[in-house]
Amino acid sequence: MSQTSQVIKLDLDQHSYDIRVQFGLRERLAEALSEWNQGQQWVVLTQQAIADLYQPLIDRLSEQGFKIDTIVVPGDESAKHISQAEQVWSRMVELGCDRSSVLLAMGGGVVGDLGGFVAATYMRGIAFIQLPTTLLAMIDSAIGGKTAVNLAAGKNLVGAIYQPKTVLVDPGFLDTLPRRNVISSLAEAIKYGLIRDTSIFDSFVARFEDLVNLADEDLLSEIITKSCRIKAQIVSNDQFEHGERRLLNYGHTIGHAFETIQQYGGLYHGEAVMYGMQCANLISHKKGLLSTAEFEAAQKLLQRFELPALGRVAADEVLKVVAHDKKNINGKLNFILLEGIGNAVVNTEVTADDIVDSLSAVA
């Protein structure tokens, strides 16, 4: 088992923090959290399946001097609702949480997004720490401070940019995940390979089965570390998504539409993004940005993943959701396309017809 610790700095002046990647980190959690423990009330925000598996970790923190309680929320997108946030806020009041309290978000992207939003707004902001348990959260959603809840009109429409104090990544958490969750989570790693680092893309092509089966810890750590470095670099350069950070939305515009249409109950987030990437690739190809060879290579890799059937997707429904997308600025959609593998670009010339035509890639 790999025991090497990788520390990645996310540089945001007074809001800077470290992302620490290490197998077995959860077994030294009290040590990793000690600098923030001043005897105040802590809250672990998690979901039932995680609490059932890892309650001993929380109990150990209590035994090691942490004043800590657990709040459990649903493990699916239904947790990202303002009513759930209100329930968490109310429970925190009951527990005596004040402005010195710390929220530890322990789970996947849903728990991290909700936890960050709750922390950003409770008493106008308290400290929070990300302890991601899914690959998607480890390499993407736990890093960068995006917090949000959903509206019926679309995903992540209400939220804030609010940075954690640290992100603690233990790839050992992945051992307990169902295969579907792992496959879905790998979407974000592939995204980094397609938008920035061709070595990640090449690793997936050459070592696909090893990655999908989590068969090589060193390879897994390498992919996670590379992905975290890319996310940290981009966020450090553009915390509030005025430019470069928009590139991280590759595959998400149409992918989010698929999720919204299915009311967050059909596709996992990563599965929707993989379908969205295929659509974005077709648009890139038709606009002459992505060569035929690269387009075919990218689609071939994405199509190797076991994804649930998308089902019938009505073009008018997709367009309706995209019209409310957060990436619309001054009436123009900032769509992310590929100008070659490893090089994403912002394009404001993607039309409704382009989006409709792209659905043929996943029909």
Image (cartoon, rainbow, N blue to C red):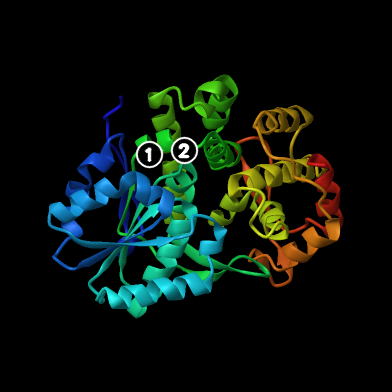
Q: Which residue is mark 1?
A: 173
CA distance separating discs 2 and 1 = 8 Å
Q: Which image quadrant for residue 77?
A: bottom right
Q: Nearer the viewer, residue 312 or 70?
A: 70
Q: Is residue 7 above or below residue 109?
A: above
Label 2 element class: loop
Q: Where is residue 146 drawn, in percent x and y?
A: 47, 61
In which image quadrant can residue 123 be found?
A: bottom left
- Tell me the amino acid under the disc marked 2: Leu
Looking at the figure, which quarter contains the C terminus? top right
The residue wearing badge 2 is 177
Residue at x 41%, y 63% (from the top left corner): 115
Q: Amino acid at mark 1?
A: Phe
> Is disc 2 in contact with disc 1, using a CB cutoff of under 8 Å?
yes
- Of residues 108 and 280, the one nearer the viewer is 108
85 to the left or right of 56: right
What residue appears at the point 78 percent right and 39 percent down from the top-left corner?
A: 285
Indicate whether 221 appears above or below 78. above
Residue 282 lies, in percent from the top left, at 78, 41
Secondary structure of the residue carrying numbered label 1: helix
Does residue 4 appear left or right of residue 262 in this picture?
Answer: left
Left or right of 143 in this view: 277: right
Query: Can residue 41 be seen at all in this image of the molecule?
Result: yes
Residue that protrudes farthest toward the top in the picture: 206
User: Residue 133: horizontal and vertical position, in percent?
Assistant: 40, 45
